[in-house]
Image: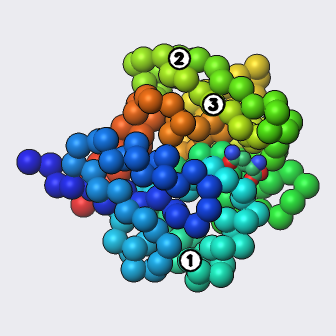
Amino acid sequence: MAKDLQVGVLSLQGSVEEHRSMLGKIKNVKPIEVKSLTALESVNGIILPGGESTTISKLLIEFGLFEPLKQRIKQGLPVWGTCAGMILLAKDVIGENPHLGLMDITVRRNAYGRQINSFTVSENIPALSEQRIELPFIRAPWIENVGKDVEVLCSLNKHIVAAKERNMLVTSFHPELTDCLAVHQYFIEKMIRAVENNK
Ligand SMILES: NC(=O)CC[C@H](N)C(=O)O
């Protein structure tokens, strides 16, 4: 029988509950609230949720998690950044200093405009799911450039909104606000379970 995976959600600010509730619906997965070093050390993978990237970055420093998280991701911990989480992972943020600076992407914050310009589209992303999935965008960033090791998973109107580089997955949109578990399942099976099976 497959061993339970401890899947963390960085729980400092943002859409934390939504991700935890999605993880709670997946078999053999234990959602873990990560806001301490001990919790960070215990997880097999981690989700950096949407919210406000500058706030989450400051809180990471305040809680003493910034460097430890950065190191664990560098060492191969599977990570999925949604929206603000994508901004946190980017090596390059247009007009601002980067935060964790780990993934070879250039992102534009609030690229789609303000809260009022939030929208949902339905797309086929064969790399992530066999079903069509709903993609809610909320003051979302997009990716303007990717480095050579980055795999582009989805573009909308020529803007990249989902990508992967080694152990890092990023999406501009919020699957945790839909009732479709496909992207969570992808992260767990294809990224976390894959690493665990190779240990
Ligand atoms: N829904 C989100 O995560 C929005 C991201 C937010 N606009 C930021 O720049 O951090």
For mark 1, what is the residue?
Answer: 65
For the residue marked with disc 3, what is the amino acid?
Pro
Q: Residue at x 67, y 53 (%)?
A: 51
Does label 1 or label 3 sit earlier along the sequence?
A: 1
In percent of width and height, residue 105 lies at 71, 47
Q: CA distance from mark 1 to mark 3?
A: 29 Å
The answer to whether 85 appears left or right of 38 in the picture is: right
Mark 1 against mark 3, which lies toward the viewer? Answer: 3
Q: CA distance from mark 1 to mark 2?
A: 36 Å
Residue found farthest to the left: 1
For mark 3, what is the residue?
Answer: 136
For mark 2, what is the residue?
Answer: 124
Q: Is residue 17 visible?
A: yes
SS at badge 3: strand
For the residue marked with disc 1, what is the amino acid?
Leu
The answer to whether the beta carbon of the residue marked 1 is less than 8 Å from any atom of ligand 1 is: no
In percent of width and height, residue 140 lies at 74, 40
Q: How is the image coloured?
A: rainbow
SS at badge 2: strand
Mark 3 against mark 2, which lies toward the viewer? Answer: 3
In percent of width and height, residue 198 lies at 25, 54
Q: CA distance from mark 3 to mark 2?
A: 14 Å
Crowd tier of the residue under label 2, counting other residues whose Cα lies within 10 Å: few below 14, some 14–19, many 20 or above: few
For the residue marked with disc 2, what is the amino acid?
Asn
Figure check: 65 above or below 92: below
